[in-house]
Image (spheres, helix red, strand yellow):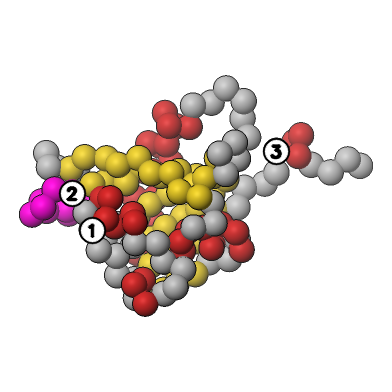
Amino acid sequence: QVYAVSRRPPVAGVDWRRVYPRLAQLTECVRDALRAEIGTLFLYDAVTDELYARIPRHEAGAAHVSGAASPQQHWAELAIPSRLGISGHVFTTQRALRVDNAYRDRRFFSGIDAQVGSRTGAVLCVPLLLPPAADDAPAA
């Protein structure tokens, strides 16, 4: 699995759940380039201090090929505390992390697997660091 963690860009009035599909296309390109089975983009919500993601949920026995949606595929919307799991660790430290066996890593949060009906093996998680917004820049 490939995870990317980012802060939601601080643009007032933008519904990030509507913008998310475009950002997910970027995640799919990276997933395909790395030949990963799943790719997920978590966005940070500063209001709730959570990481938000939209993840494919597969019914038992449904095939998942190159991320293509199938009639059996549905989407699960997830929100987890920003410091939970491998994604939370990467978000907090802002450092990439590779884990060869997720279930052997103490930082791994298996609750997502339970919710979407999968079992995570290896994980590559990287932060997507955006430049600060103009109003966040230090005064000169």
Relative vertical location of residue 76 with respect to residue 129 in this rendering, above or below: above
Q: Nearer the viewer, mark 2 or mark 3?
A: 2
Residue in the picture at 54% in, 51% down:
82
Where disc 1 sits, the SS reads loop
Residue at image mark 2: 58
Which amino acid, mark 3? Ala
Q: Magenta stretch mostly in which secondary structure?
A: loop
Residue at image mark 1: 118
- First-in-chain label (3 vs 1): 1
Residue at image mark 3: 133
Q: Residues within 10 Å of mark 2 (few under 14, many from 20)?
A: many
Q: Answer yes or no: do the residues labelled 1 and 2 have beta carbons within 8 Å?
A: yes
Stretch of the chain drawn in magenta:
58-67
Residue 8 appears in the rendering: no
Quadrant of the rendered image containing residue 53: top left
Alpha-carbon span between mark 3 and mark 1: 37 Å
Where disc 2 sits, the SS reads strand
Alpha-carbon span between mark 1 and mark 2: 8 Å
Residue in the picture at 44% in, 73% down:
106
Q: Is 114 within the magenta?
A: no
Name of the residue lying farthest toward the right = 140
Q: Residues within 10 Å of mark 1 (few under 14, many from 20)?
A: some
Q: Answer yes or no: do the residues labelled 2 and 3 have beta carbons within 8 Å?
A: no
